[in-house]
Amino acid sequence: MISSIVDAFKDLVLNFSWKRIIHILVLISIVFIVLMLVEWQTCFFKLSKIERISGLMKEIESIDSCRGGGIADLRDVCFQIIEQLKEKVKPRPVNFFLGTSPKKFLFGLLPWLIFCLFFIPSILRREINSLYGAFGALVVGSLVSLAYTLIPLRYSWINYFAIPWAGFILIVCLILNYQNKKQKKIEK
């Protein structure tokens, strides 16, 4: 099994192609999103951390009780763990409005969705390259929108309008510049 993973990395490096890199980036982003959703829904990683801390505290307490001493800080740690568990277990209020991160993601994706609308007529004419272009725009838009959620700014017009549209225009200009250079190389 390890040899197949090593062979895949060798193949990636030796037979470099943008298609493989994009496939790997999409796969990594899907795994990351799935892990985030699992943690958000179940708190699995946080609760397992608390469980390990509780197990260590039991061991420390049993060792300390054998020696006949008392650890004063152990009680404070127990109270902190109980507070963390109460925070994770108490029901969250139902919020019918999106929080800031999903809003930022959707507003960051908006320019890319509008851009994909221009592909609809050619997709309906069954032009496969247009389908690839629309899919690529959605993938790039999703990745860029995930990056927007990490930018902490206070002003809503910057978060929801300026950054997404400026990023969209910048990326489109970079792609057009790359295509022009590529076309000039082909013509020479």
Image (tube, rainbow, N blue to C red):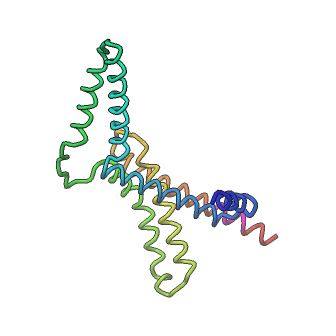
On screen, residue 26 above or below 146? below
Magenta region includes residue 179: yes
Relative to residue 165, is residue 7 drawn left or right? right
Q: Say which of 185 and 133 sits in front.
A: 133
Q: Quadrant of residue 73?
A: top left
Residue drawn at 50 percent across, 72 percent down = 134
The residue positioned farthest toward the top in the image shown: 69
**x then y, percent, for residue 187:** 78, 72
On screen, residue 66 above or below 171? above
Magenta region includes residue 39: no
**x then y, percent, for residue 116:** 46, 71
**x then y, percent, for residue 125:** 50, 87
Relative to residue 13, is residue 145 drawn left or right? left
Residue drawn at 35 percent across, 41 percent down = 46
Relative to residue 147, is residue 182 drawn left or right? right
Residue drawn at 53 percent across, 67 percent down = 136
Report the magenta residues as a range.
177-182
On screen, residue 24 above or below 82? below
**x then y, percent, for residue 9:** 68, 58
Q: Say which of 167 and 32 sits in front.
A: 32
Number of marks present in the image shown: 0
The residue positioned farthest toward the bottom in the image shown: 125
Tell me the chief SS of the magenta region.
helix
Q: Say which of 95 and 11 sits in front.
A: 11
Q: Say which of 38 and 174 sits in front.
A: 38
Q: Quadrant of residue 86?
A: top left
Quarter containing the C terminus: bottom right
On screen, residue 166 above or below 136? above
Relative to residue 85, is residue 184 drawn left or right? right
Quarter containing the N terminus: bottom right
The residue positioned farthest toward the right in the image shown: 188
